[in-house]
Amino acid sequence: MNIFKVVKRLALIAVGAAIMAFGIVNFAMPSGLASGGVTGITLILFNLWGISPALSTLLINIPLHIVYFKFTSRPVFFLTIYGTACLYAFLSIFEAIGPMIEDLQNDMILAAICLGITIGLGTGMILRQEGTTGGGAIVAKLLKDIFNIPVTKTFLIFDATVITASLLLFVDITVGIYSLIGLYISIIAINKLQEGFVSGYKVLIFSEKYKEIGESIQQNLKRGATYVHATGGYSKEEKDVLLVLIDSKQLIRLKNIVNEIDSKSFVSVSHTYETLGEGFTFEKNEKSEKEVG
């Protein structure tokens, strides 16, 4: 990995930690909202005994890091230590500055949405760089690596458990519901960042005129097409199916091409969460590398 990519990864982890810390200090602490994971535990300690979230984050993560050290590679462990340190530093900074956003206790739904977005966006950015801020993220990554359990599922269970504890200890039912809304939004944000934003469509075209359609797609849309040999389950007839990966802006044009050439064709369109490679991200990456070089 070259130095530019290392610096970029460390910078994005720091930004993610800053976003998380900003959300905790400006939306969770003033509004009394609960959160999930270790963040939620630190808020429980803050609301019950006034313990600084920055301090409790550091203390809770020490034993978790000792366990994580035995099960992960050194580069990943370094990123975890770095992410935890960033979160501790930014929590300390924002706690010292104090809330920078007007208290949203009179608009709890807005506070819950903002908390969910900041926690989800920050956590998702860090996980996307193969880092964590310790806590529940360590547990989630271990379960994914060992048992292939999805990260979002672990977060959901862990976070729901902590929020339930918050309900029993310091928040009422109404605030608990708002906290669950924030949790749901954060899970969506994490999931979206894990899946990626470069989305597209996978199109399967069943037609006797598949060659003509494929040529038209290549000429008019500048997209490649793959001929997949298939056998009908009922008819047992052998035929070729056209497979095309396309971005959302060209989907309508693709449908029109297919309809014009063979209106009796059968077309299946499915969403792809992330599409990488030539024609989608390859050209962008190549351009970026040239600019950097």
Image (cartoon, rainbow, N blue to C red):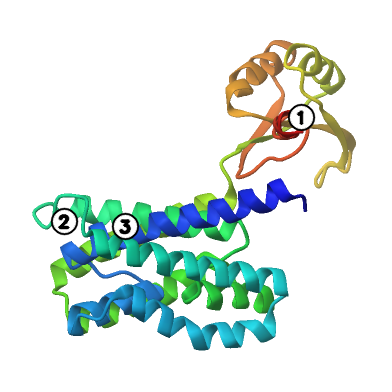
Q: Position of residue 256 (x, y in %)?
A: 64, 14
Look at 70% across and 18% down and name the residue there.
258
Do residues under tags 3 and 2 come within 8 Å of each other at their CB atoms? no
> Going from the N terminus, do you reach mark 3 or mark 1 first?
3
> Going from the N terminus, do you reach mark 3 or mark 2 first?
3
Nearer the viewer's eye, disc 3 or disc 1? 1
Image side of residue 169 versus residue 137, left or right = left
Q: Quadrant of the C terminus?
A: top right
Residue 43: quadrant of the picture: bottom left
Q: In this rendering, is residue 282 above or below 59?
A: above
> Can you identify the residue that label 1 sits on?
290
Q: Position of residue 144 (x, y in %)?
A: 63, 72
> Can you identify the residue that label 2 sits on?
108
Q: Nearer the viewer, residue 224 or 183?
A: 183
Judged from the image, the secondary structure of the residue bearing numbered disc 3 is helix
> Can you identify the residue that label 3 sits on?
23
Nearer the viewer's eye, disc 3 or disc 2? 3
Q: In this rendering, is residue 3 above or below 57?
A: above
Look at 17% across and 80% down and name the residue there.
170
Q: Tell me the distance, in whole angstroms, between the alpha carbons under discs 1 and 2.
A: 47 Å
Give the amino acid type for the residue marked by disc 1 in the picture: Lys
Residue 188 visible to an observer of this rendering? no
Judged from the image, the secondary structure of the residue bearing numbered disc 1 is helix
Give the amino acid type for the residue marked by disc 2 in the picture: Met
